[in-house]
Amino acid sequence: LVGSHPGHGVQAHEKIIIQLVIGGVVAWWLSFKLDWTELWLPWVGNVDLGFFIIPIIVFLVMFMANAVNITDGIDGLSAGTLIIAYGAFFAIALQQESANMSLLVATIIGALCGYLLFNIKPAKYQMGDVASLGMGILLTAIAFALDRPILLPIIGMIFIIEIMKTFNRLKNLKV
């Protein structure tokens, strides 16, 4: 299932398995260790989803990880869009007066700015799958930690548009 492929990197099915495991770990941590089963909805407040929160967390972790990865693969510019997305969550963390989350998100933004500075044409570094998948997973985890995953479709709109464009291209391929 997860075999050795020297020189070929991690295969697509192996990436999905790894993302599923990471999504499961994030869901386990949030729902069992932190006892978070509620989802905040605007104008409604907190809605208790019970164990149904677990598949939602796993899906969002996998979806956003791949959406960020696809965005980086298409134009290599996911760092700029990630800075904007993390900037939105930075503003939310400040508004919630969460010093730890503000510091974490500010550190991520600073690292992405440094990466972007050295990636001005001609690009010297590639973000690659490890970083782009990780940035998507971390974006989702931060959204849940700030109790605002409902804002991911708005904050991460560029990533969602890019992955939808990719799905449309794949759908229209003639085999």
Image (cartoon, rainbow, N blue to C red):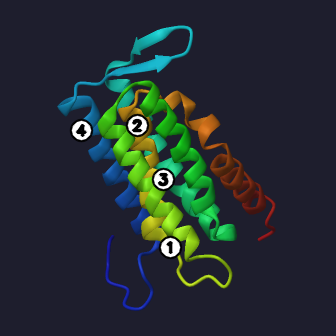
**Dot 4 crowding, Cα within 10 Å, few <14, some 14–19, many 20+:** few
Q: Amino acid at mark 4?
A: Trp
Judging by the rendered image, the residue that carries numbered circle 1 is 128
Q: Residue at x 62, y 54 (%)?
A: 81
**Dot 2 crowding, Cα within 10 Å, few <14, some 14–19, many 20+:** many
- The tag earlier along the polypeptide, 1 or 2, is 2
Q: Position of residue 26 (x, y in %)?
A: 31, 43
Q: How many marks are shown on the rendered structure?
A: 4
- The tag earlier along the polypeptide, 4 or 2, is 4
Judging by the rendered image, the residue that carries numbered circle 3 is 136
Q: Position of residue 100 (x, y in %)?
A: 30, 39
Q: Residue at x 77, y 61 (%)?
A: 169
Marks 4 and 2 sit apart, C-alpha to C-alpha, by 11 Å
Q: Residue at x 40, y 40 (%)?
A: 142
Marks 4 and 1 sit apart, C-alpha to C-alpha, by 27 Å
| SS category of the residue bearing label 3 | helix
